[in-house]
Amino acid sequence: MDKTLDVIIIGAGSAGLAALREVRKRSESFLLINDGAYGTTCARVGCMPSKALIEAANAFHRRHSFDAFGIRGAAALSVDVPAVLRRVRALRDDFVAGTLAATDELGERSEAGRARLLDAQTVAVGERRYHARRIVIASGSQPVIPDAWRAFGDRIVTTDTLFERETLPRRMAVVGLGAIGIEIAQALSRLGVEVTGFGANPRLAGLSDEAVDLALRELLHKEFAFHTSASAELSPTADGIEVRSGAVRVVADQVIAAIGRRPNVAGLGLETLGVELDARGMPPVNPNTLQIADLPVFLAGDANGRAALLHEAADEGHIAGINAMATELRCFRRRTPLAIVFADPNVAVVGQRFAELDAAQLVIGQASFKRQGRARTAQHNKGLMRLYADRNSGRLLGGEMCVPAGEHMAHVLALAIERELSVQELLRLPFYHPVLEEGMRGALRDLSAQLPAGSDSDLASCGAYKVEALD
Amino acid sequence: MDKTLDVIIIGAGSAGLAALREVRKRSESFLLINDGAYGTTCARVGCMPSKALIEAANAFHRRHSFDAFGIRGAAALSVDVPAVLRRVRALRDDFVAGTLAATDELGERSEAGRARLLDAQTVAVGERRYHARRIVIASGSQPVIPDAWRAFGDRIVTTDTLFERETLPRRMAVVGLGAIGIEIAQALSRLGVEVTGFGANPRLAGLSDEAVDLALRELLHKEFAFHTSASAELSPTADGIEVRSGAVRVVADQVIAAIGRRPNVAGLGLETLGVELDARGMPPVNPNTLQIADLPVFLAGDANGRAALLHEAADEGHIAGINAMATELRCFRRRTPLAIVFADPNVAVVGQRFAELDAAQLVIGQASFKRQGRARTAQHNKGLMRLYADRNSGRLLGGEMCVPAGEHMAHVLALAIERELSVQELLRLPFYHPVLEEGMRGALRDLSAQLPAGSDSDLASCGAYKVEALD
């Protein structure tokens, strides 16, 4: 093909489709190349089916609170796991269909196949060659499975295959207790699977604050067994897989590999770009432009290995798509970091992580939700929130938490951090009553008490008072 | 008593206790006078017991989604209404105990009895007389019961008596469909009571936006019958009360009076203050100081008839308490308005109400939650959010909604309004995926599309890009 296209986009996932939308606003001269299944990671095997599973699991788990509420008969409830999984797939199919609509009508501007860079402006798909002024790589990521585990065949399960199962076995081990591992382990446990978790990381669910991690551990230990002191090794048994970790030995029918996701860059030809690749084989990428070095190539979404999060992937596709069509590249300010794990209670890390912060410059405010009023009325009273503020300016810097409605409160905190608000400014928020946000206010007040004295009131004075000035 | 106290506080509820806390920081020369039950309206008969009831009702109602989730056996569930009410009272007692701690140790600085002003610095309790430099009136409010209804005796129920009942009758009418009426009607209906609602207000639950009201009506009509075209009249029948409203006639065993709350000012002696009282018998009060006219008297909380909301009452007690001890009165800026009705889905009104706004200066953004992704995974997909922004500045002004997690999203919106953010600025928030806040983002984007073109990106550019400036 002699014609030079404006843009080639490699990958029709969340980042690629976001890039496509920006490119199409500006040009019809593009090609979208996708290898493997269409439909985004999020819709097909990620956020959406996992949430459908978790919501069913949580609805079933709620029966343990029924007797205390005065609701009788919970013992008669059972979970029909095949039906749960059928519903997950039905919803999943519907979400996937939504993402397919974006590519269905592209005709010859869409090609299925594995793309390989020949240089910074040329892509091969099989025998074909395509040239473009700019290339956006958004090839996504995939679950990491250690090579040695491949021998166990379909006894090794990942998020790519879990939701395809017709049912669940009696015993499952979850190896890896980051965001995905914790979500899946808790959901499967709540659906009646005998779950054992194994993590090699000293903190669960992406947390970095030991106090929050301990609070989460205490809660999860009541639901399923897990071990985090050593890495896990697998060996076959007559009827399953033995998982060994330190002194622990557990036999499971299936093992869920949740040890991470790896960018899909193998075989892409990044080595043809003439830039230095790091130990992981990754080129240098500017997070504000998504450009690789000074090349006409952009690397967006999970494929660049920065954060395998949908909202970041969408932003990155957006940035890469705009820049792929720009005469002069634009440098975009990225959003306040936010990571949520849809465990119960929700785990969230917002703004700067505790581990990134300089303890000497910090004050820490915390609130337990064990006695939080509204949470007690709903029997959701558990968890811990810790917030971090700058000792001098009083600015809120970040927070880590495992608390009910953490997914919602993390958005309030993200807005405050994004706007560079001080703790005192955030305390001006009307906190309705009774709401879980009042628990968050407890952590803010704890911060406020450690900061240089501001006003003696959350309510800033509105000026000098004159007796005549009644309104 | 000859001694002149620094402050007399009339009323040991939320506002009175907040005032007390501020006074005690500055003086030990005070007297707290309370008439009737101790423990705040919120803890004893308001926010807290109602939420305990609602959470039980919602947990039971959730069974209707079980089969779709794949959870079997929901038909075997039943609700033990006496047990539900016992739990409500047990929790209530615990919350009340927390509020009593503040007054238990006051000794002779606390007096039970009905206070009556003799002038702006003198209070009578029975035969006793007390003088103070300043007086804080925080005498609370009570449910309105029309005089004609008193003949029905204990067939008329209010929030003062509902939670004391050992059980609930088969048929209940709820008269008044504001915040309290809607919460109670839906909860009782979900607990199996045959509820009929009657409202004379054209909008439910304190909403002012017709579109949101219609969405709420559509949802509530699936749960219980209600009529809002005329006011309700009651007459006795052999076995209950007939409620007539226009052409509708319904017989109920008991009627819940939810037509409003009235400030407890009758008999207080406000007429002795020498200021003009309005048609409701209320004196002029400065909302920023809580002072009555130019007198050394402050009127705070439900008693001033401004807003019967806990968080406002607490603020008002705080302001009145500080000012009662101040040499020069301080004028406080009040918080962004926020009202939440704990219906399912949550009703919320934040910032300026739709009815207050000038339609010509406005753009309206809306989002239906019927197809919202995360809501679908949880089977909570219903409701409507409408947001209002200034046509010229793009500033977010307010919102009305009946949506899942509305109570949480209303806090994000309140913060944005408090900080005077534009729609574009709020869209910089990281919206995680999949969350209900993405539904809110839909309404914000709908606004954004109607506003003067800003950036083509939620992500503000962070400055000119130089090829060399890789970071």
Image (cartoon, coloured by chain):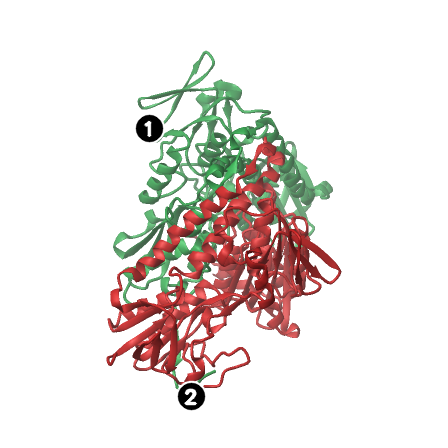
Chain colours: A red, B green
Q: Is residue B105 left or right of residue B90?
A: right
Image quadrant assignment for residue A397: bottom right
The local secondary structure at tag 2 comes to: loop
Label 2 crowding class (10 Å Cα cut-off): few <14, some 14-19, many 20+?
Answer: few
In the foreground, B462 or A324:
A324
Left or right placement of residue B398 versus residue A263 in this view: left
Give residue B250's position: percent from left, percent from top.
39, 20
Q: Is residue B295 visible?
A: no
For the residue pair A71 and A370, the one nearer the viewer reads as A71
Q: Which residue is mark 2?
A: B468
Farthest residue toward the right? A247
User: Which comes sooner in the sequence, label 2 or label 1?
Assistant: 1
Q: Are both tags, 2 and 1, on one chain?
A: yes
- Which subunit holds the residue at mark 2? B
| Amino acid found under the numbered disc labelled 2 | Glu
Res B438 quadrant in image: bottom left
Query: On the image, numbered disc 1 is attached to which residue?
Result: B230
Label 1 residue SS? loop
Q: Position of residue B141 (x, y in %)?
A: 52, 37
Front-lying residue, A122 or B314? A122
Q: Amino acid at mark 1?
A: Ala
Q: Are marks 2 and 1 in contact (CB under 8 Å)?
A: no
Q: Residue furthest top?
A: B238
Residue B469's place in the image compared with B316, above or below, is: below
